[in-house]
Image (cartoon, coloured by chain):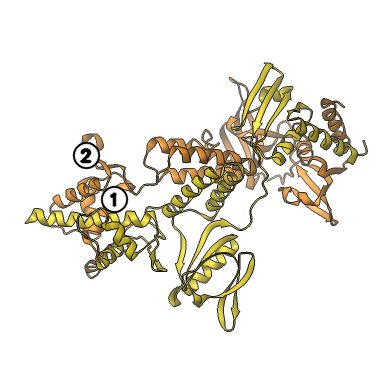
Amino acid sequence: MFKIAEKTELNQISLTGVRGIVLMGLLIAQPRSLDEIRKAFIELNIMEDENSDDILRIDLNTLKIMGCEISRASSKTDFKYVLHKHPFSFKISNDELSLLKKAYNQAKNRTDFLGILGYDELFKKIASKVFDEETKEALLGISILKRYDIQMLKDLLLDCSQGRILELIYKKSPSGEEKKEVIAQKLVFQSDKVYLYAYDLAKKESVTLLANKIKSILSRKYDKSGFEPNVVKVCFDLDASSYTDLQEGEVILSNTDDTLFVEGHYHNEFIAVQRILSFGSKCVVKEPVEFRNTIITKLKEMRESYGN
Amino acid sequence: MGTKEAVKRNQSSMQVLKTLNLLLENDYTMTELIRKLNENEKEPLFNNSVVSKYINTCRFCGFEIPKIHNKYFVASIPFGIELTANERDLLDDLHFAVKNTMSSTSDESFGIFLKRLNNYSNKELIRVEPKTQQQAYELFDKAVEEKRKVLLLFRAKAVFECIPLRIVEKKGKTSFHVIHDGKEKVIAADRLTGLEMIDKRFEQPDNNDTQQEVVFKLKGKLASTYTLRENEKIVNNNSADELVVSNVGESKKNLFSRLLRYDKSCEILFPLHYREEMKSILDEMLLNYGA
């Protein structure tokens, strides 16, 4: 973190000032014993070998006077000085935390899985610079992924990108578990949950698994069969103003000034129906005819709820 | 003698830390720094050469403190937060959500929070002078690529917040082509003393959020499996296969799109104009299919 001081440079700067900043930097990084601090100071050329430890104690007192909370080095702390609080740490008030939480709840509805993962990492990064434990916990608690195994999600992301075959244990009911063999396809964040879109090799159908119900991954292997995911293909007309709503797996085949002809590939029919309905009146399914009829039937049922 | 020496050294260390603390709060000129530092002293301890020495001490310890427009800016901190471009985008999205769905007071408070976070994180700020010009061009190109606004700090002390377009040659001079106040401008690099890429994107997502309360009924399996969002509460849950939910603050576009996805398992109850609108959408959708 800090560079070794050249003797010539020390004339232009305050040596005790350097020691104050370096000491704070060392204690921010981790608790240190007096010996460790002395060793670091000597290595950085900001203390002579023959200097007494009193210099270090005075430096520690100086930090305390400046508002640092440093616990005494005792057997409880393995004879290390622990920095609990310092005036240069990042502070967040309770009002700001609540604002951050509200903003996140709005923003997360417009983002995908990678965005949600990004927010989780951002909160962790900010929290690492916050010294107050309560604030730190509250900040980490904002993320929707707080109860997820992040490493498992990252591994699944890689599994999906490589289309790996996973043997996994999936929580079926409150007490039951089942073993599954699936080809990982995509991680999706929807309705405040993370789903793994996959192909179940035993059932020979596309499945949607809740990521937090995956208890463990027993094995991973590359799919050498050249498996092509069994996707539902739907062609539809879409109002050109909805261009920005298009997502991965939807491609424009042709367009006029006000209409786009789109081909969408979906994990299964249920997801395809949800997606088409979500466009509202801006979308008209053209092919396949059976799927078009399914949508018409759904719409008639939905319209019935609202009476005349 | 030894004790006196020790106290003297301590004071100097404290003064360096005080200077640093002040610089982390805001950007100051030397005169402002001296005045602020002397405010709580019985007699003036700080002068130009002392404060310069303290700033150099901080620089020696790894703080990047360029002087632009006579002001000292803390551009990077050895124990600060290193934010990636993606993380800056996410913060921008959060600010956008506050701006569009909350009160102006909340917007102001969130702005203050972001400014403090920005002070604590390492900035993309560079002094524009012959030896750093190449780095300034690279920073400008980075801003174009990341779709971020820039602050141009002129020698004449003006500061322009601009949308960066490209670097061009004009009258033999390397210049920045930007949009400022809705007008395109070409500004020669030698007119500037500093360039900063800021946490504002120039492409904002669409948003029409409101504070409207919307009540909808969920039926069947969805009623028992539905997960309430932060902005939702249960209004009625009298039977196992029916759940009435109140939602406040979700954008109309998002909400309609989401409720449509629930197909016949969902029905809007309140407000009536939302219910009528959903009815019209469904009529329009059926008409699209000639049904």
Whether residue A149 is visible to the viewer of this picture, yes or no, is yes
Relative horizontal placement of residue B85, taking residue A90 as reference (left or right): right
List x then y, in percent, for residue A160.
63, 44
Residue B158 to residue A160: above or below: below
Residue B132 to residue B234: above or below: below
Residue denoted by label 2: A72
Residue farthest toward the bottom in the current orientation of the protein: B172
Q: Colour of chain B?
A: yellow
Give the image quarter of residue B55.
Answer: bottom left
Disc on res. A24: 1
List x then y, in percent, for residue A171.
60, 26
Q: Chain of mark 2?
A: A
Give the image quarter of residue A203.
Answer: top right
Residue at screen point 86% across, 56% down: A256
Give the letter of the orange chain: A
List x then y, in percent, for residue A138.
45, 35
Three-letter amino acid code of the residue under disc 1: Met
Residue at screen point 79% across, 37% down: A277
